[in-house]
Image (cartoon, rainbow, N blue to C red):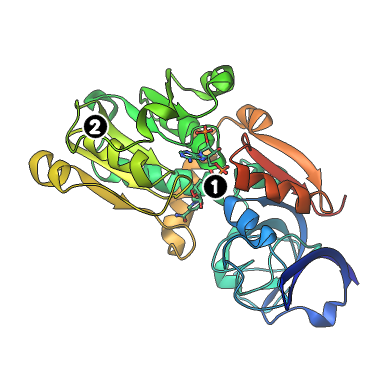
Amino acid sequence: MFKAIQIEKTDDGQTVSLKELDENSLPEGDVTIDVAYSTLNFKDGLAITGSSPVVRTWPMVPGIDLAGTVRDSSHGDYKAGDKVVLNGWGVGETHWGGLSQVARLKGDWLVPLPRAFSEKQAMAIGTAGYTAALCVDALIDAGIAPDQGPVLVTGATGGVGSVAIALLKAAGFQVHALTGKTQEAEYLKKLGADDIVDRATMSEKGKPLQKEIWAGVVDTAGSYTLANACAQTKYGGAVASCGLAQGFDLPVTVMPFILRGVRLLGVDSVMAPKERRLKAWDRLGRDLDTSKLEAIGQEIGLADAIDAAGKFMSGDVKGRYIVDVNA
Ligand SMILES: NC(=O)c1ccc[n+]([C@@H]2O[C@H](COP(=O)([O-])OP(=O)(O)OC[C@H]3O[C@@H](n4cnc5c(N)ncnc54)[C@H](OP(=O)(O)O)[C@@H]3O)[C@@H](O)[C@H]2O)c1
């Protein structure tokens, strides 16, 4: 038997509870993992609160991330005792996820735990931090360099934003942090932000072309924030779009793209191929100062994850919740 959070479908919606489950009920997979830590992401908040149809098979164990030790494996790349990390691949949506003491998954979905991190640190990073690394890779691969001007990170106090700030600073950029929590300026500066921008200045409809400020942008907000970010991006700059914290709409004109050659780069973490994952985790292992993870992550137990997930919906979360599934 093992403990897991389980979401069950009911006639009027769903119920979420901490359950004792039988290992015979685990889904198919070629690797069984003793999970040490999971974490909470925006998507887990949506799944656990039922505020968006994230869960597609029932019952579901949520948790799009996990770090742990392989217990059994029939996959050629992994053997018992190996430390591994899982991000995405529909885990916690269509396949039982990481908010559980045991998980059974496809070995092809796993990456080895980077040597730089403990399991707990890898989950302080989680999908949010790994997505931040994908965004930074996307900007740098698009030729954006520190001598071209400052970069903007939106949703700065969130999981993606916090890690993006730290990685961009480590890569030599001048980083401006857009936040609705200007009282968190000290936290953002410790992560590496050079300047703080009030979220309200970019959250309403703006002009199609605005003063050119940013060489690059990591956007977690979508909607007007992303539209204004595109309108403020310098000639030849690039905007990495990964989130929808403000909204999934994009009320932009083509002007930044056709008059300034601005590029909009879509970033997806869920189905990203393995080589892109390994490159992102390499960047995290190389550039992320593990002492910064202390500020980003707060640890909670498995049972606390249900309440904590609701906080994502209010936009009140600073940094990341790390879930000790054995506490
Ligand atoms: N593409 C992918 O594969 C991928 C992967 C991971 C996450 N995401 C998406 O990326 C986004 C951020 O994820 P996360 O884990 O960092 O979430 P998070 O920890 O909840 O952070 C989101 C942040 O967005 C800001 N925010 C909240 N409401 C906003 C609004 N109305 N307008 C503008 N900003 C707002 C807040 O930061 P401030 O108070 O500092 O402004 C909040 O902390 C989410 O939409 C998530 O779904 C996508």
Residue, far front? 12
- Side of 179 where 21 appears, left or right: right
Q: Is residue 227 above or below residue 20?
A: above
Residue 223 coordinates in the image, percent (x, y): 36, 46
Q: Is residue 33 above or below residue 268?
A: below
- Label 1 crowding class (10 Å Cα cut-off): few <14, some 14-19, many 20+? many
Residue bearing mark 2: 232
Residue 119 coordinates in the image, percent (x, y): 71, 48
Residue 142 coordinates in the image, percent (x, y): 25, 45
Residue plotted at (39% across, 24% down): 176
* Cα gap from disc 2 to disc 1, whole angstroms: 25 Å
Q: Are marks 2 and 1 in contact (CB under 8 Å)?
A: no
- Side of 253 where 279 appears, left or right: right
- Side of 310 where 327 appears, left or right: right
Image-quadrant location for residue 35: bottom right
Which of the two residues, 221 or 208, is positioned nearer the viewer here? 208
- Side of 292 where 243 appears, left or right: left
Residue bearing mark 1: 128
Mark 1 close to ligand 1, CB under 8 Å: yes
Picture mark count: 2
Where disc 2 sits, the SS reads: loop
Residue plotted at (84% across, 53% down): 303
Amino acid type indicated by mark 2: Gln
Q: State which quarter of the image contains the N terminus.
A: bottom right
Residue 215 coordinates in the image, percent (x, y): 25, 31
Quick one: label 2 or label 1, which is nearer the N terminus?
A: 1
Residue plotted at (42% across, 60% down): 275
- Label 2 crowding class (10 Å Cα cut-off): few <14, some 14-19, many 20+? many
